Image (cartoon, grey):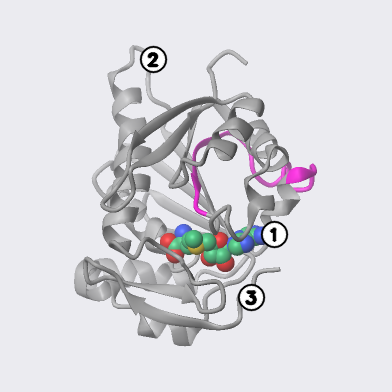
Amino acid sequence: MVNILKREIVITADGSSTIRLCEEDECYHSVNGALAESLHIFINNGLNSFLNEKRASVEPIHKCISILEIGLGTGLNCVLTAIEALKHKDLIFNYIALEKYPVTVQELKCLNYEIFLGRDYNSILEKIHSVQWGVSEKILNNFNLTKIERDIKELEGDSLKGVISNVDIVYFDAFSPNIQPELWSREIFKGLFSMMSGGSILITYSSRGSVKIALRESGFTVKRLKGPSGKRHITLATRPDTF
Ligand SMILES: C[S@@+](CC[C@H](N)C(=O)[O-])C[C@H]1O[C@@H](n2cnc3c(N)ncnc32)[C@H](O)[C@@H]1O
């Protein structure tokens, strides 16, 4: 059982902060750079490569992009995605974030993302954290956010299927398989697969063999990509178009 209660704020190698679980010695982001990691994995290799591929294809890109984040945490991936949404005014972003252990107001005050985001973009991060749980809110003209305070283990059953569907991109950002192996299971990935559209992607920082096997056994096509600083590889899983 993970001890989520004892947490502290730490500064990572690029100067951006993250949260550390003291007893597990597990951080919410890479100690080699929280901001650099989020940008490399979820924004560049996740969102932007998905959008580039769709824009290059002969099929018209659908106007709504649906993103599901597993583990909202500090909101860093969410705010970076919202900033990207500002560059794609022709698209509407529907962002759903699942979180079992929301970050406290006190912790949010101690994070230093404002230094990197600047005041305007930091106000988007503040909006993200002020959105009520379980309610869909428009935080930008083309960005709707729904935060769901639920356990991702519910993905094993059917209870989240009615709530989440036709997902284009999954940011799988749970704690590592070292401390939460049960969250990187075939059952969870199958649950996600069933909520995703054909041609959709799941991007995650773990490139562990057992994770890739579980993803393949759930129906995904799995590819290894170059990791951010301090991490050799990350994983991109695609739900085939014709499944
Ligand atoms: C590695 S951190 C990533 C945080 C986040 N993406 C960010 O940018 O700060 C993992 C997140 O998953 C959440 N989490 C852990 N177990 C969970 C569960 N069973 N269901 C939902 N969320 C969970 C944690 O509370 C934490 O916020």
Q: Residue 64: x percent and y percent?
A: 45, 36
How crowded pointer 1 is (Cα within 10 Å; few <14, some 14-19, many 20+) is rated as some
Question: Which mark is on residue 3?
Answer: 3
Residue bounds of the magenta highlight: 156-173
Residue 166 forms part of the magenta stretch: yes
Q: Could you say which is closer to the camera, residue 60 or residue 14?
A: 14
- Mark 3 or mark 1: name the one nearer the start of the chain: 3
Q: Give, as a three-letter code, the residue at label 1.
A: Asp
Farthest residue, direction bottom: 106
Compute the Cα span from label 3 to label 2. 47 Å
At mark 2, the secondary structure is: loop
Q: Residue 89: x percent and y percent?
A: 28, 42
- Mark 3 or mark 2: name the one nearer the start of the chain: 3
Residue designated by label 1: 151
Q: Is mark 1 within 8 Å of ligand 1?
A: yes
- Mark 2 or mark 1: name the one nearer the start of the chain: 2
- Examine the rendered structure and indicate whether residue 47 appears above or below residue 22: above
x 33%, y 16%: residue: 57
At mark 3, the secondary structure is: loop
Question: Which mark is on residue 38?
Answer: none
Q: Residue 222: x percent and y percent?
A: 49, 27
Q: Give, as a three-letter code, the residue at label 3.
A: Asn
Question: Which mark is on residue 59?
Answer: 2
Q: Is residue 24 left or right of residue 1?
A: left
Residue 228 forms part of the magenta stretch: no
How crowded pointer 3 is (Cα within 10 Å; few <14, some 14-19, many 20+) is rated as few
For the C terminus, the image quarter is top right
Q: Is residue 215 left or right of residue 63?
A: right
At mark 1, the secondary structure is: loop
